[in-house]
Amino acid sequence: MKMRITLPILLLVFTSCSGNYTPKPLGYLRFDPPSTSYFTFGTDSLPYSFSVSRLAIIESLHNDDTTKWLNIRYPDFKATLFCTLNKTNPEILGRQVDECVTLAIKSIKTKGDVKETDYEDVDKKVFAKMFTIVDGESSSPIRFLLTDSATNFFSGALYYDFDAKTDSIAPVTDYIKQDIIRIIQTFSWNE
């Protein structure tokens, strides 16, 4: 009885594998950045303007006397830049900058570093910092702030609409980072 069961199993094992097995290579998502054009965004109700990608949708949210909210959505990438404009003064500006740095550090889920990049255009009174999370998982891989160092403090943070691994979405994050750099470089105060 044992021989009747063992013989078919052995035959199946030795005859089932024929030919050489070659493992398939790992597959990676391919991201071909779309070409884009830019338009200048600005309204009479906001004290600033900047260039933004035509791939983005701008949503103006509730605004009051001291705070104005703006979302820049990238529906194709399921990502949003959440932006806020606060009134400031030289006494509280340092605390606002420190808070932005703290939020960048606190958003890191795993061990990683924050790369800080400074931008400055003295003629337009635009002073900016961009914080990029390097080598770590983060709920917000990029944060930035802009100020005129006197009365306005504009900040933004990039979030994805899904839980994603940093290395998986790196090409999309790099693409949006270039748009953020464009926003910073074309930002101007309308006062």
Image (cartoon, rainbow, N blue to C red):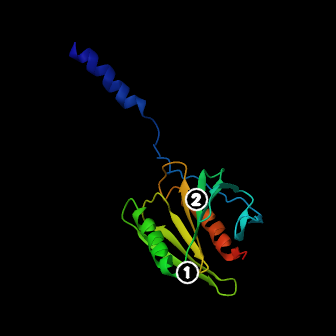
Q: Is residue 182 left or right of residue 8?
A: right
The image position of residue 9, as x and y in percent, is 32, 23
For mark 2, does the 10 Å Cα neighbourhood hold few (<14), some (14 to 19), or many (20 or more) residues? some
The image position of residue 190, as x and y in percent, is 73, 75
The three-letter amino acid code for the residue at tag 2 is Phe
First along the sequence among labels 2 and 1: 2
- In terms of depth relative to the viewer, which is nearer, 18 or 148? 148
Quickly name the residue at label 1.
Answer: 118
* Residue located 72% across and 64% down the image: 45
Indicate the secondary structure of the residue bearing disc 1. strand
- In terms of depth relative to the viewer, which is nearer, 64 or 133? 64
Indicate the secondary structure of the residue bearing disc 2. strand
Quickly name the residue at label 2.
Answer: 82
* Residue located 70% across and 71% down the image: 48
* Residue located 39% across and 59% down the image: 109
The three-letter amino acid code for the residue at tag 1 is Asp
Residue 115: in sight, yes or no?
Answer: no
Number of residue marks:
2
Q: Nearer the viewer, mark 2 or mark 1?
A: 2
Q: Which mark is residue 107?
A: none
Q: Is residue 24 above or below residue 184?
A: above
Quadrant showing the C terminus: bottom right
Q: Is residue 119 above or below residue 107?
A: below
Residue projecting furthest to the bottom: 122
The image position of residue 171, as x and y in percent, is 58, 61
Q: Is residue 57 left or right of residue 142?
A: right
Residue 152: in sight, yes or no?
Answer: yes
